[in-house]
Amino acid sequence: MTKFSDLNLDPKVLKAVADAGYETPTPIQAGAIPPALEGRDVLGIAQTGTGKTASFTLPMISLLARGRARARMPRSLVLCPTRELAAQVAENFDAYAKYVKLNKALLIGGVSFKEQEAVINRGADVLIATPGRLLDHFERGKLLLTGVQIMVVDEADRMLDMGFIPDIERIFSLTPFTRQTLFFSATMAPEIERITNTFLSAPERVEVARQATTSENITQSVIMFKGSRKDREGTEKRKLLRDLIQSEGEACKNAIIFCNRKVDVDTVAKSMKKYGLDAAAIHGDLEQSHRMRTLDGFRDGTLRFLVASDVAARGLDIPNVSHVFNYDVPSHAEDYVHRIGRTGRAGKKGTAIMICNPRDERNLADIEALVNHQIPRGGEEIAPTLEASTAESKPETEEKPKRPSRTRKPKSAAPKAEIADAQKDAAPKADAPLAAQHSDAQQEQPQPRSQQNERKSNARGGHDNSRNTTQRGGAPVGLGDDMPSFIAKSFEERMDS
């Protein structure tokens, strides 16, 4: 069996590895470190949790042990897709290079530009950065990449998912053609393969597992879930998650709960805390200091449950994670591999449980096609108890009581006979002088309510075609019965003339 001492690493690096408690390299480390020490390009393909970070960190430190960095011109460059992964690589670098005098700089968002510029100006042997912040410093004229001897791209498939491929290509064009490139990815999408063919020179391909495979140490299952009503689906789904955690008992020491949307991350975390579960949220909209505090609390055991978006799905080395719950089925099948890879690491056992709605069955089928096996369906025993408990317990958000419907009083309507008689009585008055009609109208009895309503509607702009006709010698009834007498008189005099 290969040991680290057989890999021709620098003695100071071997001493740091021994202090960390490692004796035997993982397959990806055993395959990638020797060609990297020879100065060759390396294309490493391995599932998450197999030790890819040490595969490039250890040979980099050995190769950079001799030499000196110049201001604003780093000697090596490590590109990471997320701030958390970049910070983790920096921690590994500190652990393995503690006996070697090398300077590092960490360029990530959420940190002051001035502080980062001060580190760059002192000279950095190793520059660890996210693509966006790196290009920001370059465009400000604070950084030169012409002195890069070794370039590392970590989690390249995640770079593709996050839309960083154009930035990666630009950064490649800013580095010397003679650089050494170490390229690592868990999957090999066509776009990733195009980049490797373009920017890597005769790379040593190290593939220690079939692409997009899941660890055999992880027990997987999927719970098929359908809400009773659309407006209660979220409440019932969160209760199902709590019941699943409770059903695992003491075996669930800690867990990461993955959600597809940031708003769901916050909602699930608040719901879990409301019901007495120690949980905290982490996603890209939170401040970097808050995210690091949350991760540190989860690592040291003071936080039991971490509710996260895919920002925590790639590359984060969090030891002793017993469970991973996929609250949502990932939209991209590759994300499932990375999510459940947070558990079952370093040969330990892990459990991954996923909740699937009927509308997510297509994504579930894509995942099963990618991993080339059917994920066992579970939850037959927990489903009946869940239905009973949801029927007995109140939902998290009670529905507002409906307002009592108002019963309108029926409008008093005059009989049809009365309306017909009123029309007949009004007909002969059309030929009479309008002044006489006006005086007679004052002596009439009040009209039925329906006729009054009809008159009001006409006054508001309604039209009655029967009143818009003008007979020869009669009054223009289209103006209404309440027309002033002086208007009617002038009209009669014109008619006589």
Image (cartoon, helix red, strand yellow):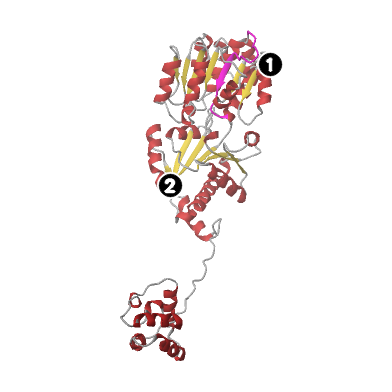
Give above or below for 212 relative to 406.
above
The disc labelled 2 sits on which kind of residue? Asn
Residue 1 seen from this side:
no
Q: Nearer the viewer, residue 464 or 411?
A: 464
Please state if 167 lies on the left or on the right of 422 as rendered. Answer: right
**SS class, disc 1:** helix
Query: In which quadrant is the C terminus drawn?
Result: bottom left
Residue 74, magenta (yes or no): yes
Give above or below for 71 relative to 50.
above
Q: Residue 334 in the image: x percent, y percent?
A: 44, 32
Q: Nearer the viewer, residue 284 or 353?
A: 284
Range of magenta residues? 66-82
Q: Earlier in the sequence, mark 2 or mark 1?
A: 1
Number of the label disc, if any, that sits on residue 357: 2
Residue wearing tag 1 = 122
Residue 88, magenta (yes or no): no
Q: Residue 327 in the image: x percent, y percent?
A: 50, 43
Separation of disc 2 and disc 1 at Cα? 54 Å
Q: Residue 437 in the image: x percent, y percent?
A: 41, 87
Please state if 161 lies on the left or on the right of 146 as rendered. Answer: left
Q: Majority secondary structure of the magenta segment? A: loop
Residue 304 seen from this side:
yes
The disc labelled 1 sits on which kind of residue? Arg
